[in-house]
Image (cartoon, coloured by chain):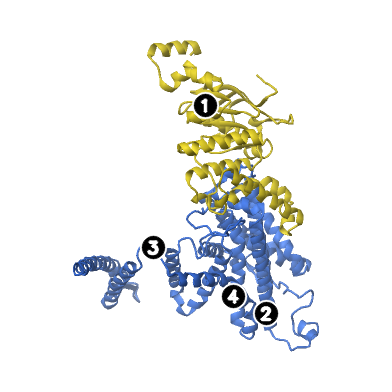
């Protein structure tokens, strides 16, 4: 299972909520510098897997391993929520956008650089006296934010409140904000939800540029199959908390079990598939 | 066409008049039922303990009439004003003048404050009032960090004020330390208590947080009352030394500042000194807050107010961020407390009741959470208003409460509700208050 090329390795992950098993012994790996999509029908446990990876839930059992390009390895299931972003460098976005609505787009991207800026401001003390090193760091942070605003095409609206931006812009701003934390793995929870065709295309382009130009690996939950099939390098399919298939988009497209999970099948076929899965 | 429109509007006005009349009649009826017992009949215990009563129909009629007329007036005012949140179009010129005036408020206010001791040198009352207002401005700015920026509702802010005051009082009376040594110590001790309060309340939000902070404020007060051997209990601490100007006391006699400068001594000199002292302390608070807002810690506070979950997803340690907000706010409360102790010369637990917390919180909310100028204006309005209405005796609180209700109806997000961004690329434009969150506690 473990491969030098894997950035994320999920091993027999199980998540129980009382008597309900949301994710059951799930194992999969995401490759470095690739876009891995996590798909499945509603309620399949995709967001639960995300919440386990990003530390919002503590898994009931199993291990989640993240390996940095330098070779450092982190057990994400043992790290606290904010440390997963701070130390292990995993960033995420949310299904329902969670921007700081009352702050400007630029401020949102500045907040994302909190940990680096905190160090540069000497835990606030150097910043209070306005030390030159702090000023330089702040200028650099603004430049970085400007770079990302340019990437998502929102430079003109840098000084507008994030809550005033159109829906599609807010989605892209949230991705830019996650990228400002300087992650090695970017987890996106349904980034194309609610976008029109043109905005989806722009999103695909943005994600490909993040993969190719920034070298950031991406883990993606998505319902929009056109986006998934177009940009992902690997696809993992979940249904009822278990993995039913993984492979390249082409393989997934032809997989009978995936088609069955999504579209439903005749009764005899259900029995056949159940036998195959050992249920 | 032209003749129909007025007829229509006349009909509408008539229907409106009928509605207003009906509403006023109902209000008057309710008032009649309520007041017939409360005002109409007066009961008292007679000389032998028996019940005697008499009727006061004239007063009753007066009250009902007042409610009837008042209801009509209020309804007419509402018609004239329209719904509270209608956007009001102003002519371009008026808006520009207003914008200029708005920008000028802060500098003008600051310059005026600096000149107060010069203008009112001989008026003890004005100077005393000015010191009081500035103390509350400072407390408001301190609490603004916790409530306005970090969005943590703190109902026990007076605890830190008390810690600061008692720190200075006890250190000065027991160890003879000077005000300038005690001032930072009082701030540090208050900040320490802020962190101590912060730990248990970190998991709480909203109403639950408010209740725990309220209880904390009461605990501090009760400890002060009951720890007689240290704090003197309800008798308080007296004989707290007055502040000195770098060791030179402001007293009559040879060693005093007046004698050294060769000018005649006047009791006003000490007041003027205290005035500038609290002004300096308040301005330091303001400077620090403005500065902190532009630093990562301040942005994290505001981000915490906006969305705590998103903060965690960005790798921000919400625990330490909340604790620093509590500690910083508490520190400025401690400074203000030390000043209070040296100004009064005597402190007792009575000065640190929940009412003080509520007043400071009212200043922050009324001013517009997070706005420095708004808090200063609110402190001036509230504390100044208290004094202004002093002539009204028992009706003082009534008038005060009513004016607060009207102010909040007129400006639901405080005097200055919009938010200024901490950093900008090209346009420094304010953010409308309906986007800015109040925090969840």
Q: Which residue is mark 1?
A: A229
The x, y position of residue A195, in whole percent, is 47, 38
* Chain that bears disc 2: B
Q: Which residue is mark 4?
A: B108
Which element carries disc 2, helix, strand or loop? helix
Instruction: State the CA–CA distance, disc 2 to disc 3.
Output: 44 Å
Q: Which residue is mark 2?
A: B272
Instruction: State the CA–CA distance, disc 1 to disc 2.
Output: 76 Å
The x, y position of residue B23, in whole percent, is 26, 65
Instruction: Tell me what residue is drawn at x 63 percent, y 57 percent.
Output: B293
Task: Return the disc, 2 or 3, that comes first in the chain's sequence.
Answer: 3
Which element carries disc 1, helix, strand or loop? helix
Is there CB contact under 8 Å for labels 1 and 2?
no
Which label lies toward us, 1 or 2? 1
Which label lies toward us, 3 or 1? 1
Instruction: State the CA–CA distance, disc 4 to disc 2.
Output: 20 Å
Seen in the picture, residue B323 relative to B97 is either above or below; the reply is above
Which element carries disc 3, helix, strand or loop? loop
Instruction: Tell me what residue is drawn at x 48 percent, y 14 percent.
Output: A279
Task: Return the disc, 4 or 2, that comes first in the chain's sequence.
Answer: 4
Which label lies toward us, 2 or 3? 3
On the question of residue B40 being in view, the answer is: no
Along the line of sight, the residue nearer the viewer: A192 or B75: A192
The x, y position of residue A8, in whole percent, is 64, 27
Which label lies toward us, 1 or 4? 1
Q: Which residue is mark 3?
A: B84
Is there CB contact under 8 Å for labels 4 and 2?
no
Seen in the picture, residue B155 relative to A166 is either above or below; the reply is below
Instruction: State the CA–CA distance, disc 3 to disc 1.
Output: 52 Å
Judge the density around disc 2: few (<14), some (14-19), many (≥20) Cα neighbours within 10 Å.
Answer: many
Chain painted yellow: A
Instruction: State the CA–CA distance, disc 3 to disc 4.
Output: 30 Å
């Amino acid at each position: 299972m473990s491969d030098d090329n894997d950035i994320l390795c999920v091993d027999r992950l199980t998540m129980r909520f009382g008597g309900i098993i949301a994710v059951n012994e799930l194992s999969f790996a995401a490759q470095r510098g690739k876009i891995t999509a996590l798909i499945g029908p509603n309620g399949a446990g995709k967001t639960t897997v995300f919440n386990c990876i990003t530390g919002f839930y503590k898994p009931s059992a199993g291990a989640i391993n993240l390996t940095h390009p330098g070779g450092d390895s982190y057990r994400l299931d043992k790290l606290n929520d904010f440390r997963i972003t701070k130390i292990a460098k995993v960033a995420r976005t949310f299904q329902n956008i969670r921007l700081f609505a009352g702050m400007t787009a630029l401020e949102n991207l500045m907040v994302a650089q909190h940990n680096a800026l905190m160090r540069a401001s000497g835990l606030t003390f150097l910043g209070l006296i306005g030390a030159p090193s702090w000023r330089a760091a702040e200028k650099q942070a603004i430049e970085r934010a400007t770079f990302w605003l340019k990437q998502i095409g929102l430079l003109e609206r840098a000084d507008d409140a994030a809550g005033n931006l159109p829906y599609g812009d807010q989605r892209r701003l949230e991705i830019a904000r996650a990228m400002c934390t300087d992650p090695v793995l970017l987890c996106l929870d349904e980034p194309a939800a609610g976008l029109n065709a043109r905005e989806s295309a722009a999103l695909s382009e943005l994600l490909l540029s993040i993969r190719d130009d920034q070298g950031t690996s991406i883990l993606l939950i998505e319902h929009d199959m056109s986006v998934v099939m177009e940009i992902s390098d690997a696809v993992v399919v979940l249904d009822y908390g278990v993995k039913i298939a993984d492979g390249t988009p082409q393989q997934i497209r032809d997989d009978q079990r995936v088609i069955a999970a999504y579209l439903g099948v005749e009764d005899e076929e259900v029995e056949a598939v159940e036998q195959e899965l050992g249920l | 066409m032209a003749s129909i429109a007025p007829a229509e509007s006349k009909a509408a006005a008539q229907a409106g008049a009928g509605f207003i009349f009906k509403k006023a009649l109902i209000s008057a009826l309710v008032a009649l039922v309520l007041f017939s017992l409360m005002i109409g009949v007066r009961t008292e215990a007679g000389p032998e303990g028996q019940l005697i009563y008499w009727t006061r129909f004239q007063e009753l009629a007066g009250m009902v009439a007042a409610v009837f007329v008042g209801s009509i007036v209020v309804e007419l005012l509402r018609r004239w004003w329209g719904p509270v949140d209608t956007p009001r179009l102003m002519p371009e010129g008026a808006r520009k003048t207003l914008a200029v005036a708005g920008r000028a408020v802060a500098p003008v206010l600051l310059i005026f404050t600096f000149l107060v001791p010069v203008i009112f040198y001989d008026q003890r009352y004005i100077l005393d009032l000015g010191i009081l207002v500035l103390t509350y401005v400072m407390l408001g700015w301190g609490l603004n960090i916790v409530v306005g920026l970090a969005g943590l509702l703190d109902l026990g802010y007076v605890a830190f004020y008390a810690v600061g005051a008692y720190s200075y009082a006890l250190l000065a009376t027991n160890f003879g330390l000077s005000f300038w040594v005690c001032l930072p110590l009082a701030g540090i001790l208050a900040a320490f208590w802020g962190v101590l309060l912060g730990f248990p309340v970190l998991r709480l939000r909203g109403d639950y947080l408010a209740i725990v902070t309220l209880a904390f404020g009461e605990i501090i007060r009760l400890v002060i009352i009951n720890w007689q051997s240290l704090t003197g209990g309800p008798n308080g601490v007296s004989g707290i030394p007055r502040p000195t100007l770098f060791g030179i006391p402001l007293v009559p006699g040879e060693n005093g500042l007046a004698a050294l400068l060769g000018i005649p001594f006047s009791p006003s000199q000490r007041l003027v000194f205290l005035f500038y002292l609290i002004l300096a302390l308040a301005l330091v608070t303001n400077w620090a807050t403005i500065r902190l807002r532009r630093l990562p810690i301040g942005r994290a506070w505001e981000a915490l107010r906006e969305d705590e979950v998103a903060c965690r997803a960005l790798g921000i340690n919400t625990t330490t961020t909340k604790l620093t907000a509590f500690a910083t706010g508490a520190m400025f409360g401690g400074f203000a407390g030390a000043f209070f102790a040296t100004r009064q010369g005597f402190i007792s637990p009575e000065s640190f009741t929940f009412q003080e917390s509520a007043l400071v919180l009212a200043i922050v909310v009324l001013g517009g959470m997070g706005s420095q100028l708004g808090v200063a204006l609110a402190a001036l309005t509230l504390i100044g208003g208290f004094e202004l209405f002093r002539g009204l005796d028992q009706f003082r609180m009534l008038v005060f409460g009513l004016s607060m209700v009207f102010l909040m109806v007129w400006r639901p997000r405080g005097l200055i509700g919009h938010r200024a961004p901490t950093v900008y690329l090209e346009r420094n434009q304010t953010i409308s208050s309906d986007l800015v969150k109040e925090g969840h506690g």
